[in-house]
Image (spheres, rainbow, N blue to C red):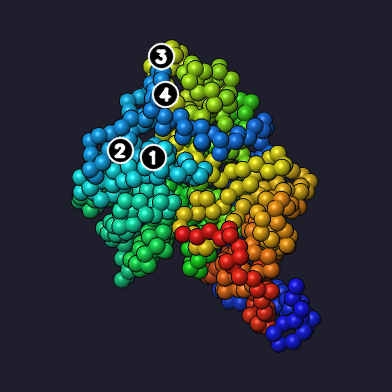
């Protein structure tokens, strides 16, 4: 416990702190400062409905129930492990089994690799969004895929690095070209970067990440990116052709949310390599999204832009409009009308939080997008905790509704491939490609695109989609139950790839109308529980199984920190033993539309920092970080 400050009695510091806080709040409330407004003022885009939303608010999440019904949460960690043992088993026998096959073509590298079918019953294929996702998903639940029963599945993923076709990129197939569709040509690279985070010494992963960042920087320049004068690249294309070094418009659709994935890749690469070109490219990409006046969501890349915008705001002091971009991840798209996040009930089931089309046949959700959206947005809360409640509520709904993709999630009359599942999938670990709101009066129907007549004849390939099922490890790695049904523990570091040093951080959301006491296992060392949403300690000096009170209809972002650690502040960051535990988001932005500067409750977030700097408040009792074994970093 602190007894004295450096320059006098702690009593005097506390007195000045309280008096200074009162004076500054009153001063800020009445004074007017020209050309300065809070961030709730209209953003610098036109015709943008998110301008009326408060920071931290996600409109479509507001429409979701606090507690979905019926509520049946699966053990997603177990689903992932069951899936891994199923699809990588060469000894499986039966119709369309085994799934796993060797590829001996030595594409790109002189080694064997593997193939998996994209659907149960379809031709065995080499889709990276399936194969790399399966390896990554198992990794997220703690399976070492670099040495699983003596097999290095991770190294074999390197064969998707397209050298033979002179692309020098991870692409969806092992011998293919760019220029067809952004998302199929970017998601494999995103998955590779994520694998490289967990397996940094595998193959030539390090050089490949650098080369890919260079390639996409050059693409940004070819798309018009410039620093003198400053100009953002134009991603309003269908794809980018790396042989011709030009954007491709197929005249049918465009995928401008590619900027989100490229921005993510470039920012990660700058953090990793320090090459200023990569930071420039990241700013170009996120600025492109920031300045758009329409929702660019095409498939599943946009949430990586929301995450990157929030992280750059927090780490670099940028002022990107996270609220606009994150709401676009949920709202109906402009470039792909009706595409976004589902709300409402389909038949007797809450389907809130699923991802896909709101308009195709009344609604058509897909497993892959549902998993991916959550994986990109959960870590965003570390960099802008104002979204903790909205994202916590969203994930509760999505994780509950995602069970409907599986054989045990719906009655067999609501499925079109249950004949195969009954025999071969007793653990219900293989998901349907998607879920339709209604099909000929059956609401909902678990189905897919590959065999649209299967409900009628039960023949031919199934609509069970491995390419979507392979992403389930995102849920398996992030989501854990607590002692309270409906309150989940969400791991905010699991998919926060290439984050700086960090303590274990978990998001909790309470959907109840009453306070709940939530248990948390902090391990054997004595720790404190810091809540980034309230900027306060909930418990101090705890070990083993502890607990904290989570107020009704709120969220907590709990950071497990060393007990009595050294507390310090740098700009908008709160640190304990030199490790960031909290970011205070920027709450002001300039506008020519008004000269008023109004007080809001959020102002209280920056006043303590000002007072601390004014009085040079000293640190809490010091404890070396090496005594704490849970710090996580690169």
SS for dot 1: loop
Q: Residue at x 70, y 39 (%)?
A: 485
SS for dot 2: strand
Q: Looking at the image, is mark 1 or mark 4 nearer the viewer? A: 1
The answer to whether the residues at label 4 and label 2 have Cβ atoms under 8 Å apart is no
Q: What residue did someone put label 3 on?
A: 459
Real-space Cα distance between discs 3 and 4?
21 Å
The numbered disc on residue 150 is 1
Q: What residue did someone put label 4 on?
A: 92
The answer to whether the residues at label 2 and label 1 have Cβ atoms under 8 Å apart is no
Real-space Cα distance between discs 2 and 3?
31 Å
Q: Which of marks 3 and 4 is nearer the N terminus?
A: 4
Q: Which residue is drawn at 71% across and 50% down?
A: 545
Q: Looking at the image, is mark 2 or mark 1 nearer the viewer? A: 1
Q: Which residue is drawn at 59% across and 20% down?
A: 411
Residue 429, percent from left and from top: 51, 29
Q: Quadrant location of the N terminus?
A: bottom right
The answer to whether the residues at label 3 and label 4 have Cβ atoms under 8 Å apart is no
SS for dot 4: loop
Whether residue 183 is visible to the viewer of this picture, yes or no, is: no
Real-space Cα distance between discs 2 and 1?
14 Å
Q: What residue did someone put label 2 on?
A: 113
């Amino acid at each position: 416990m602190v007894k004295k400050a450096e320059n006098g009695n702690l009593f005097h510091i506390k007195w000045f702190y309280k008096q200074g806080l009162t004076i500054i709040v009153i001063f800020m409330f009445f004074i007017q400062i020209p050309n300065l407004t809070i961030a709730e003022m209209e953003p610098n885009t036109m015709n943008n409905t998110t301008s009326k939303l408060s920071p931290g608010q996600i409109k479509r999440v507001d429409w979701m129930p606090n507690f979905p019904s019926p509520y049946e949460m699966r053990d997603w960690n177990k689903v992932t492990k069951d899936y891994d043992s199923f699809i990588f088993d060469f000894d499986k026998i039966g119709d369309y089994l085994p799934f796993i096959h060797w590829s001996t073509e030595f594409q790109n590298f002189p080694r064997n690799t593997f193939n998996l079918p994209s659907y149960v019953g379809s031709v065995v294929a080499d889709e990276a969004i399936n194969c790399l996702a399966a390896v990554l998903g198992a990794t997220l639940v703690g399976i070492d895929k670099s040495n699983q029963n003596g097999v290095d599945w991770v190294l074999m993923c390197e064969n998707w690095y397209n050298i033979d076709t002179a692309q020098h990129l991870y692409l969806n197939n092992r011998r293919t070209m760019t220029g067809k569709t952004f998302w199929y040509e970017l998601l494999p690279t995103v998955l590779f970067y994520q694998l490289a985070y967990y397996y940094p010494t595998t193959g030539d992963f390090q050089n490949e990440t650098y080369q890919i960042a260079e390639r996409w920087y050059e693409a940004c320049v070819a798309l018009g990116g410039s620093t003198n004068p400053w100009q953002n690249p134009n991603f309003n294309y269908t794809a980018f052709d790396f042989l011709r070094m030009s954007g491709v418009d197929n005249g049918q659709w465009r995928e401008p949310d590619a900027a989100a994935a490229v921005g993510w890749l470039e920012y990660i690469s700058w953090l990793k390599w320090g090459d200023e070109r990569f930071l420039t490219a990241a700013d170009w990409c996120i600025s492109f999204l920031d300045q758009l006046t329409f929702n660019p969501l095409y498939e599943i890349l946009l949430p990586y832009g929301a995450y990157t915008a929030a992280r750059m705001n927090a780490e670099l002091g940028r002022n990107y409009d996270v609220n606009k971009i994150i709401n676009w991840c949920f709202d109906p798209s402009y470039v792909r009308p009706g595409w976004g996040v589902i709300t409402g009930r389909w038949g007797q089931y809450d389907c809130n939080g699923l991802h896909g089309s709101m308009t195709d046949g009344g609604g058509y959700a897909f497993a892959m997008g549902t998993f991916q959206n959550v994986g990109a947005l959960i870590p965003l809360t570390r960099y802008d905790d104002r979204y903790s409640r909205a994202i916590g509520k969203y994930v509760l709904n999505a994780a509950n509704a995602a069970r409907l993709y599986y054989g045990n999630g719906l009655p067999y009359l609501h499925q079109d491939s249950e004949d195969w599942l009954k025999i071969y999938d007793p653990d219900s670990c293989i998901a349907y490609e998607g879920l339709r709101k209604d099909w000929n009066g059956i609401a909902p129907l678990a189905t897919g695109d590959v065999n649209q007549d299967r409900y009628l004849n039960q023949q031919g390939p199934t609509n069970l989609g491995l390419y979507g099922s392979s992403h389930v490890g995102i849920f398996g790695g992030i989501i854990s139950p607590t002692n309270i049904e409906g309150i989940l523990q969400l791991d905010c570091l699991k998919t926060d790839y290439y984050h700086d040093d960090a303590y274990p951080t978990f998001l909790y959301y309470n959907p109840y109308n009453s306070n709940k006491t939530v248990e948390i296992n902090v391990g054997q060392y004595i720790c404190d529980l810091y809540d980034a949403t309230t900027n306060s300690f909930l418990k101090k000096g705890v070990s083993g199984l502890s607990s904290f009170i989570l107020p009704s209809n709120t969220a907590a972002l709990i950071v497990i920190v060393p007990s009595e650690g050294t507390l310090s502040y740098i700009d908008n960051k709160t640190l304990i033993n030199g490790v960031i535990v909290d970011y205070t988001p920027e709450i002001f932005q300039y506008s020519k539309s008004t000269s008023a500067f109004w007080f809001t409750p959020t102002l209280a977030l920056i006043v303590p920092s000002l007072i601390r700097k004014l009085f040079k408040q000293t640190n809490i009792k010091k404890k070396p970080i090496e005594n704490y074994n849970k710090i996580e970093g690169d």
